[in-house]
Image: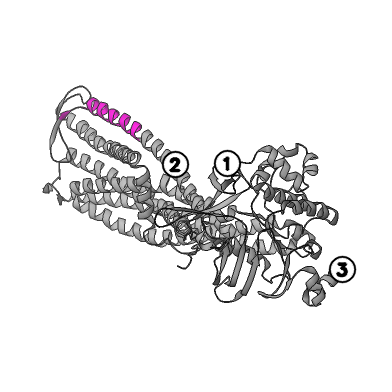
Amino acid sequence: MPPVRIRERGRAKKGTMKRLLKQLFKLYPGQLILSLICLIFNVFGNLSSSIFVSLATNTLTAAGPIHANPFTDTFPVSTTFGFTVNTNVTTLLIILGSIYIVGIFASWTWNRTMAIVTQKFMNEFRKAMFNHMQDLPIKYFDTHAHGAIMSMYTNDIDTIRQFISQALPSLIQTGLVSIFVFFIMLYTSVWMTLVVVIGFFFMLGVVKGVGGKASTYFIKQQSTLAQVEGAIEESINGLKVIKVFSHEEKSEEEFNVLNEELYHNASQANIHGNIMMPVMGNIGNFLYILCGVMGAFIYIFGWRNLSFSGFEVIKGDAPRFAGMIALFLMMSRMFANNVNQFSQQVIFIVQGMAGASRCLDLIDEEKEKDEGYVYLCNIIYHEDGTFEETSEHTRDYAWKYRHKDGTLEYRELKGDILLDNVDFSYDGKKLVLQGVNIYAHPGQKIAFVGATGAGKTTITNLINRFYDLADGKIRYDGININKIKKADLRKSLGIVLQDTNLFTGTVMDNIRYGRLEATDEECIEAAKIANAHDFIERLPEGYNTMLNGDGSNLSQGQRQLLAIARAAVADAPVMILDEATSSIDTRTEKLVQQGTDKLMEGRTVFVIAHRLSTVQNSNAIMVLDHGHIIERGTHTDLINQKGVYYKLYTGAFELE
């Protein structure tokens, strides 16, 4: 299955809103139903004011001819809906006040509930994204810009928040109000409603034209913002390189190009978005006037007013006309305002769906496949040479797997590694390793040397199963590594990578990262093995010194020593040292070499090094060139052959 790419531009993919709402309702059905009920009460409260104003107008108008007190006397009042009620203004105000009190409580409950639901959903959504990201293959991060991925957790998540907390409730409220208002207008006067309908389609055209452009630019703004954030991240990470090569002006030029594009997209988005409200507001005002004019024509010229109650002539019936026109004008204004409010939310809806599409693209990425069924377990040896599984941490391990008949089989982990005719390609086209055959017996030290890009690090990545083979097999104690659970496979491998990564936390926390259950004493012992103990003790707070920014307050050599200490505390039976001493001076290298020699005792070790002095005591040295092993043997054997290794070795000494 090809990887799902992060969509950078364009609209949301089909079904995004349905999927998002389905997930939201699945997590919080009770809260959403409560919010919907409160929203309906709130809508009813907003509508009731217009209806009661109409009734109050009719009451005041009807009180004059019969010389009644509209506030204390109760008398029949004709309504716009064709029936009569016995009431007065005081009663209407009490009922309206009660409705408003219920509406205030409903509005408070609805807003509070939606705020809680939104933040809870964002919390769960971020966790789902992050947890899924942890299970993605390394290849995903090789093919996607890190700045774009970061932007999903910040900008795209925020657009989803705006959609759920603002656009979605507004959309529901607008829809409910518009439907109720439309039927009230239709019941009151079909002719004036036709004027509103014509104005509504005109407003939709404005939303489609102006709002469509605004939405397009807002989507581009999100995409460009991700590029800008990626450029900033890259500049911060490479700030020393930029300054060393006096690349500040060029870096500024490159940033300004992206920033100008962001400025253009953001300004166009906000220009089109900001003119929406005044344009729609003025259309609503014009519609209000047209409805008033139409109502006046109906009354003055005695036109038959068509409503749900039938044809009727209201000429000369001033109280009836006053109540009808007051109600209709308020309804038309409310209808126009709701369409205007909806037009403001269109942008947030489009942005939210585009952001949700990108986030869901990440969640839809295929996880790192792991079909292994062989597990790693700790064992304890008995005096007779047999062993059994234990839950305690020991330095002895075994492979455990269950047969189809349910029986368990244990195989002692010895550290025997075999690469059998391995081919590999990163892109599926060009082979970077071809026909590689390597065997490492338990306790042996195997070294890889060669020019940059020869394939040395790739071999160790394949042993870790960061990537899958194109052809061939890798066996670990006679077991195909495809059958071993990846987490257990990697747990059996202690690694010091070429690029050292330290995390925010104390020095002790960073060493313990190699084995989370390790005690402080074990971490300190590991630091002593790596010869990191002395410099740690000289830090302001020793092992409790906080590290920030990937250990920026340490030298490169100190950071690498901590990485070696981390591998030491992992206490894995197989070690991989990828340029472990590349950033350490010659004096410190000798100290580390003594520590790593002690660390490597009884373990199978793979070493990648440019400094050939660190691999002379290897059991076998593999010389790679363009993905092929061109020479192999001990240091003495390869020197006697006077081939590529001999030239590298003598050249190194000439350089020194």
Task: Judge whether residue 188 can be spotted in this image.
Answer: yes
x and y percent of residue 519 in the render? 65, 38
Disc 1 to disc 3, how far (Cα)? Answer: 48 Å
x and y, in percent, of residue 414 in the image: 62, 56
Q: Quick one: SS at disc 1?
A: loop
649 vs 84, left or right, is right
Which amino acid type corresponds to the residue marked 2 in the rendered image?
A: Lys
Residue occupied by mark 3: 653
Q: Which residue is mark 2?
A: 120
Q: Secondary structure at mark 2?
A: helix
Residue 14 drawn above or below residue 501: below
Report the front residue among 630 and 81: 630
Q: Compared to 108, does 293 lie above or below?
A: below
Badge 1 is on which residue?
392
Q: Over which residues does the magenta segment extend?
A: 86-106
Rendered residue at 33%/47% (across/down): 172
Quarter of the picture holding the N terminus: bottom left
